[in-house]
Image (cartoon, rainbow, N blue to C red):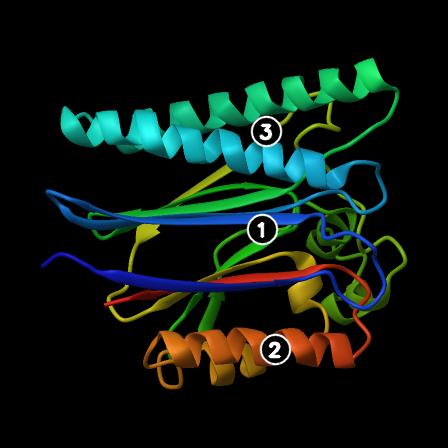
């Protein structure tokens, strides 16, 4: 049985910054194997110049991949996890070199996170660099990506608790990002897509001031029965994090599988 998808998004400059350095894309297409959905969120580095240039560049490159190489794989029936991993990681490495060279030529540093998901033939595939996130929401919520941050490393080593990390001054320090790292090593995550589940992508500005339970209540399958409710939930939580004084750009994508 093939899956179908609907998707919504919301992005906001937030209460402090002058530009929105987050970028996103959503693509849903019909294939002989049912619908496919491809989405990504990129968070341009807020402390670095021209973050919006880096995030949009990576979005464009990955959308071009979908429109050409993915379509080619579907047309000639050559799609595989191994080929996808190879193409995605190569593209991330190429983008890291291209953006880094652009920064060097212009005398400034810029970079971006990326969290991308492809759901195809009842499997999900994720490429991840940085601290944007992908979640699966059913009756509960599961984070599918691991933050590549200094505080996440400290938590894993037992030197910080998750509660301490939320207020740590180093919270936004990334271990790697596309464009500002000497070498980039993306995470590649694969899993079985759950029928009826919702998949959420977000920049870190969306998640700091709200709880997993609030995400479930506003964005879960029990509440978001159609696109209007999905959009309403994304907008409500965006306004909530702004009300709670989040200072970063705020971006969320919500995908409903059916």
Whichever of callouts 2 and 3 sits on the residue coming sooner in the sequence is 3
Disc 3 secondary structure class: loop
Disc 2 secondary structure class: helix
Q: Which residue is mark 3?
A: 185
Q: Residue at x 78, y 47 (%)?
A: 150
Whichever of callouts 3 and 1 sits on the residue coming sooner in the sequence is 1
Q: Position of residue 240 (x, y in %)?
A: 68, 81
User: Does 104 appear above or below 216?
Assistant: above
Q: Which residue is mark 1?
A: 146
Foreground: 70 or 151?
70
Could you classify mark 2 by the number of other residues whose Cα lies within 10 Å: few (under 14), some (14-19), or many (20 or more)? Answer: many
Q: Position of residue 75 (x, y in %)?
A: 15, 28
The CA span between labels 3 and 1 is 13 Å
Could you classify mark 3 by the number of other residues whose Cα lies within 10 Å: few (under 14), some (14-19), or many (20 or more)? Answer: some
Quadrant containing the C terminus is bottom left
Mark 2 vs mark 3: in front: 2
User: Does 238 appear above or below 119?
Assistant: below
Q: Position of residue 225 (x, y in %)?
A: 32, 81
Could you classify mark 1 by the number of other residues whose Cα lies within 10 Å: few (under 14), some (14-19), or many (20 or more)? Answer: some
Q: Left or right of 112: which side holds 5?
A: left
Disc 1 secondary structure class: loop
Q: Residue at x 19, y 59 (%)?
A: 3
Whichever of callouts 1 and 2 sits on the residue coming sooner in the sequence is 1
Quadrant containing the N terminus is bottom left
Q: Residue at x 51, y 79 (%)?
A: 233
């Amino acid at each position: 049985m093939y899956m179908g998808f609907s998707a919504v998004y919301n992005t906001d400059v937030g209460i402090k910054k002058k530009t929105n350095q987050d970028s996103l894309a959503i693509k849903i297409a019909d294939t002989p194997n049912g619908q496919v959905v491809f989405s990504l969120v990129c968070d341009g580095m807020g402390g670095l110049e021209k973050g919006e240039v880096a995030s949009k560049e990576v979005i464009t490159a990955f959308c071009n991949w979908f429109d050409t190489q993915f379509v080619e794989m579907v047309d000639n029936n050559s799609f595989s996890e191994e080929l996808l991993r190879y193409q995605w990681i190569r593209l991330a490495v190429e983008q890291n070199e291209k953006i880094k060279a652009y920064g060097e030529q212009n005398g400034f540093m810029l970079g971006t996170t990326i969290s991308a998901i492809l759901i195809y033939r009842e499997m999900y595939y994720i490429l991840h660099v940085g601290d944007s996130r992908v979640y699966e929401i059913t009756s509960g919520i599961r984070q599918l990506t691991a933050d590549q941050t200094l505080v996440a490393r400290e938590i894993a080593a037992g030197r910080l608790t998750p509660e301490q990390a939320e207020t740590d001054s180093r919270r936004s320090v990334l271990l790697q990002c596309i464009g500002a790292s000497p070498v980039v090593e993306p995470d590649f995550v694969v899993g079985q897509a759950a029928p009826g589940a919702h998949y959420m992508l977000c920049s870190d500005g969306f998640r700091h001031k709200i709880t997993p339970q609030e995400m479930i209540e506003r964005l879960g399958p029990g509440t978001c029965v159609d696109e209007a409710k999905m959009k309403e939930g994304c907008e409500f939580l965006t306004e909530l994090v702004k009300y709670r004084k989040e200072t970063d750009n705020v971006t969320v994508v919500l995908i409903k599988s059916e």
